[in-house]
Amino acid sequence: MATLHFSAPERAQLLHADPHPGNFRLLPDGRLGVIDFGAVARLPEGHPEPIGRLVRLALADDADAVLEGLRDEGFLKPDDDIDARAVLDFLLPMLAPLAADEFKFTRAWLRAEATRLGSPKSPAYQLSRHINLPPSYLLIHRVTLGSTGVLCQLEAKAPYRSIVERWLPGFAAPTD
């Protein structure tokens, strides 16, 4: 499922935008069958490179570059006074699946993230009120959240980082 999510934009210039369990079938040979392409995001250039680059920079603890990149992409207003370290503290728990070579998605992890982000008294919730989701990222965000939810329901364990490194532009470390 993760391979589908990250490879489809490069391979088909489309992102399946309705990732719920009813739209997937495990085929007898172990492959993933995907149905219902009524909702897709057209990504003729593949996944936007800034997503991968900003995730890589966040995992490298480059708070200033992440803050600048989020402003450049329209996630943050240019004049909002936001602490770069607070932005990383907000993002890094969500990026846990990419911080290790292998990650086990669990309902408990998803519940903890939902609680952290949804509690009005939490610093994460307070910061989220300053974050804007640019329209060009809406379906990508929806698919990422939906796919993550399905992976957590399945308690899936996968080499998520290597999948993302292979398919998400900007995530792999630049080569000189």
Image: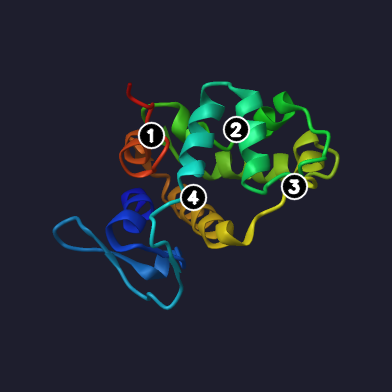
- Give the Cα separation between the discs numbered 4 and 3: 17 Å
Which residue in the structure is indicated by mark 3?
118
Q: In which quarter of the image is residue 109?
A: top right
Amino acid type, residue under disc 2 in the picture:
Pro
Q: Residue 148 carries which label?
A: 4
Q: Which of marks 3 and 1 is nearer the N terminus?
A: 3
Q: Which of marks 1 and 4 is nearer the N terminus?
A: 4
**Image disc number at residue 161:** 1
User: As rendered, which of 1 and 172 lies closer to the eye?
Assistant: 172
The amino acid beneath tag 1 is Arg
Query: Which residue type does callout 3 highlight?
Result: Gly
Left or right of residue 17, residue 136 in this image: right
Percent position (x, y) of residue 67? 67, 33
Q: Above or below — where is 62 with respect to 2? A: above
Pointer 3 local density, CA inside 10 Å: few below 14, some 14–19, many at least 20: some
Residue labelled with disc 2: 93
Marks 2 and 3, the one that precedes in the sequence: 2
Q: Residues within 10 Å of mark 1 (few under 14, many from 20)?
A: many
- Residue 112 visible in the picture: no
Looking at the rendered structure, the secondary structure element under dot 2 is loop
Q: Do the residues labelled 3 and 1 touch (CB within 8 Å)?
A: no
Residue 158 screen position, x and y as percent: 34, 38
**Distance from the alpha carbon under mark 2 to that under mark 3:** 14 Å
